Image (cartoon, helix red, strand yellow):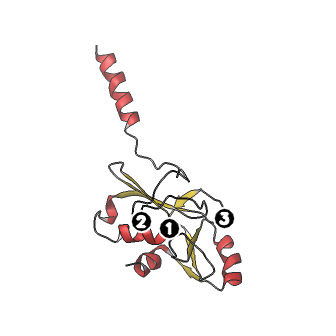
């Protein structure tokens, strides 16, 4: 009997793992603006410590929600953004490199793209005459 309870407990702990999930482009809707996520170069996801997942089509939608006070920043286990150079790949928002430029045609006009590698961002920064931002600056800009 003890082994059955142990096995059941193990399965319940496994099923409770809190993880992000891939964005389903063409299906998922933005939590803020309700638009369907379509452009795989953009997107973001917030996952709470309780496992609630919020998906966004653009950084300004995510940051509007993030800064809204509905959830405290420490309640998010994951803050993820899509790497512009690797469509649909979610990366840690805090570690990403951001480029702001009028040349960036993001879904909700934030004019911001996220990059996993600084070199990728730097290559487009000159071409697009953009401004390099880090997570803290980005969060402040969209308050």
Q: Indicate which label's residue lies in the foreground, 2 or 3.
A: 2
Measure how far apart labels 2 and 3 are at the Cα level. 24 Å
Q: Quadrant of residue 55?
A: bottom left
| Within-10-Å neighbours for mark 1: few <14, some 14–19, many 20+ | many
Quarter of the figure with the C terminus: bottom left
Q: Is residue 22 above or below residue 69?
A: above
Residue underneath mark 3? 85
Of helix, strand and loop, which one carries label 3? Answer: loop
Q: CA distance from mark 3 to mark 1?
A: 15 Å
Among the 4 quarters of the image, the one containing residue 40: bottom right
Q: Which residue has dot 2 on it?
A: 33
Residue in the picture at 62% in, 66% down: 84
Local crowd size for mark 2, using a 10 Å CA cut-off: few (<14), some (14–19), many (≥20): few
**Labels 1 and 2: the sequence-earlier one:** 2
Say which of 85 and 61 sits in front: 61
* Number of residues whose C-alpha sits closer than 10 Å to that of mark 3, classed few (under 14), some (14–19) or many (20 or more): some
Mark 2: secondary structure:
loop
Question: Which residue is situated farthest in the top direction here?
Answer: 1
In the image, is residue 119 above or below residue 36?
below
Q: Which residue is mark 1?
A: 58
Residue 71: percent from the left, percent from the top?
A: 29, 62
């Amino acid at each position: 009997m003890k082994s059955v309870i142990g096995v059941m407990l193990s399965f319940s702990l496994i099923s409770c793992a809190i993880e992000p999930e891939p964005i389903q482009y063409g299906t998922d809707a933005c939590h803020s603006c309700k638009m369907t996520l379509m452009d795989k170069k953009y997107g973001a996801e917030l996952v709470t410590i309780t496992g609630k997942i919020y998906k966004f089509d653009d950084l300004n939608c995510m940051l509007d929600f993030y800064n809204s006070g509905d959830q405290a920043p420490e309640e998010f286990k994951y803050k993820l953004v899509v790497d512009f150079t690797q469509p649909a790949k979610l990366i840690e928002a805090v570690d990403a490199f951001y480029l702001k430029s009028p040349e960036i045609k993001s879904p909700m006009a934030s004019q911001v793209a996220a990059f996993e590698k600084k070199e990728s961002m730097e290559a487009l920064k000159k071409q697009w005459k953009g401004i390099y931002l880090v997570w803290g600056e980005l969060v402040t800009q969209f308050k």
